[in-house]
């Protein structure tokens, strides 16, 4: 039996506890709530399947060993990041949204703490639930940090005896995972060698594209393939894994460390001790009404300029991988947060009766479409481009490859990133 939440407050609900959700919650608490009439009537409620935030980009290296990152920086408690705000203005619910009724303006929440269900009314809501990867090794997906750590532990046991690994997917997740495993298990070929001869563990990347890293220009993709060869990784292009036997190997925690027979689209088969599916992602939007989703992607159909979900009604927004406003990327989220924060500020003030000439002007988001992607390959190399400019390997290492952005997330999680209003 679902219980009704407190109806005396104007709840601003944030669904999701990663980059988008944490950032907009901090922004609202720092800049928007203090400016609202009857501030005390408003409350930010964050709902997240995980009680700890993680630098998701670090998963390709972190899944190998706990010794490769300081764990107190890799995982941080979400509730602790919000203890800085006045009591009563923020509430954290460890759980998941099961239904959003945007017409009736309620959201049904299943609590992970006690298993109970409650119905929250909302004055405003932000969908920032992100997306799930095919492999439970590469993110929190729809599980919490405990499940992720257990998945890593199971995989690490399998690594101890594995002689072959196949990774499906030639995007950044697949290439980075292959590079990390290759260097960790096989080492790296010498400076004058074009590839590592007789690697200890056979590692294969299978991609359906004509090149790995299809978002980057072919010459950069070729450099990435050369770096992979130096850590014992083979790339199979224009091919894809069409079936896995037994089913779900690599895709569920119970079969992360199981061997598999893989059928490829060209009719060949691969036998492997470990299989990692790293092809694409699935938006975490199944709890939303289909009429507000993009039918081609299942993402929230979001106004790409204002970040409002126009089909859903007033004061409803979306950001991050669950939304179709931009290509999935952390830098897109960071650029969108001030836009979303400003437009929420405007909408909430107007709803409270503040004259339009006294509210912030609407802010419009414009996606950065120039070639921008950084891909570490092992612990010392990498390829990439930023705003259309190709970057040397040492710069990719310096900016991302050292610790997979771990040096950047502290201010995001703590809210210092959003100390100044847009």
Image (cartoon, rainbow, N blue to C red):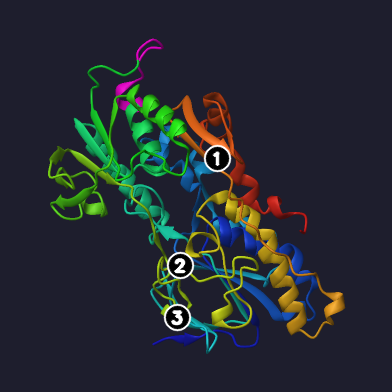
Q: Position of residue 413 (x, y in %)?
A: 61, 52
The magenta region covers 183-193
Residue 319 at x, y = what percent?
56, 64
Kindly check if marks 3 and 1 are in contact, taking CB atoms under 8 A apart as contact. Answer: no
Tell me the SS state at disc 1: helix
Q: Is residue 141 magenta?
A: no
Q: Is residue 33 above or below residue 77?
A: below
Query: To which residue does mark 2 refer?
Result: 299
Label 2 sits on a secondary structure element that is loop
Residue 185 magenta-highlighted? yes
Residue 204, position as x, y percentages in the image: 26, 34
Instruction: Answer whether residue 155 is visible to the viewer in this image.
Output: yes
* Above-or-below relation of 362 to 73: below
Q: Which quadrant would the C terminus be assigned to in this image? A: bottom right
Residue 388, which numbered label?
Answer: none
The residue labelled by disc 3 is 291
Sequence-earlier tag: 3 or 2? 3
Residue 82 visible at all? no
In this view, the mark in front (2 or 1): 2
**Front-most of 99 and 263?**
263
- Measure the alpha-carbon separation of dots 3 and 1: 37 Å
Residue with the most extreme top position: 192
Mark 2 is surrounded, within 10 Å at the Cα level, by few (under 14), some (14 to 19) or many (20 or more) other residues, namely many
- In the rendered view, does 292 fall on the left or right side of 337? left
Q: Position of residue 28 (x, y in %)?
A: 69, 66
């Amino acid at each position: 039996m679902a219980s009704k939440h407190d109806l005396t407050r104007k709840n601003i609900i944030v669904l999701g506890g990663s980059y988008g959700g944490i950032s907009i919650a901090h922004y609202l608490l720092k800049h928007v709530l203090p400016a609202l009439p009857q501030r005390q009537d408003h409350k930010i409620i964050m709902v997240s399947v995980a009680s700890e935030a993680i630098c998701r980009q670090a998963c390709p290296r972190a899944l190998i060993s706990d010794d490769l990152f300081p764990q107190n920086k890799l995982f941080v408690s979400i509730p602790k990041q919000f203890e800085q705000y006045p009591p009563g203005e923020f509430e954290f619910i460890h759980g998941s949204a099961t239904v959003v009724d945007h017409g009736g303006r309620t959201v049904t929440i299943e609590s992970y703490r006690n298993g109970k269900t409650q119905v929250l009314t909302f004055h405003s809501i932000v969908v920032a639930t992100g997306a799930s990867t095919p492999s439970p090794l590469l993110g929190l997906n729809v599980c919490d940090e405990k499940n992720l750590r257990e998945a890593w532990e199971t995989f690490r046991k399998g690594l101890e005896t594995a002689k072959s690994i196949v990774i499906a997917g030639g995007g950044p997740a697949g290439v980075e995972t292959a590079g990390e495993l290759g260097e960790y298990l096989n080492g790296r070929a010498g400076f004058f060698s074009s590839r590592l001869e007789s690697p200890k563990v056979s590692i294969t990347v299978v991609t359906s594209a004509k090149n790995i890293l299809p978002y980057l220009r072919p010459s950069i993709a070729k450099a990435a393939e050369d770096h992979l060869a130096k850590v014992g990784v083979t790339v199979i292009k224009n091919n894809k894994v069409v079936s896995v036997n037994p089913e779900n190997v690599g895709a569920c925690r119970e079969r992360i460390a199981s061997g598999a027979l893989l059928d490829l689209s060209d009719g060949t088969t691969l036998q492997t001790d470990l299989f990692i599916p790293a092809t694409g992602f699935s938006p975490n939007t199944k709890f939303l009404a289909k009429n507000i989703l993009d039918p081609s992607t299942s993402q929230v159909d979001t106004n790409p300029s204002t970040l409002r979900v126009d089909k859903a009604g007033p004061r409803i927004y979306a950001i991050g991988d669950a939304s179709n406003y931009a290509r999935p990327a952390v830098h897109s989220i960071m650029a969108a947060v001030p836009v979303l924060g400003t437009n929420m500020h405007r909408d909430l003030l107007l709803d409270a009766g503040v004259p339009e000439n006294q509210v912030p002007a609407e802010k419009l988001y414009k996606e950065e479409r120039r070639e921008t992607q950084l891909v570490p390959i092992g612990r010392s190399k990498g390829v990439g481009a930023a705003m259309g400019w190709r970057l040397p390997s040492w710069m990719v290492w310096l900016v991302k490859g050292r610790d997979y952005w771990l040096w950047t997330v502290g201010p995001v999680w703590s809210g210092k990133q959003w100390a100044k209003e847009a």
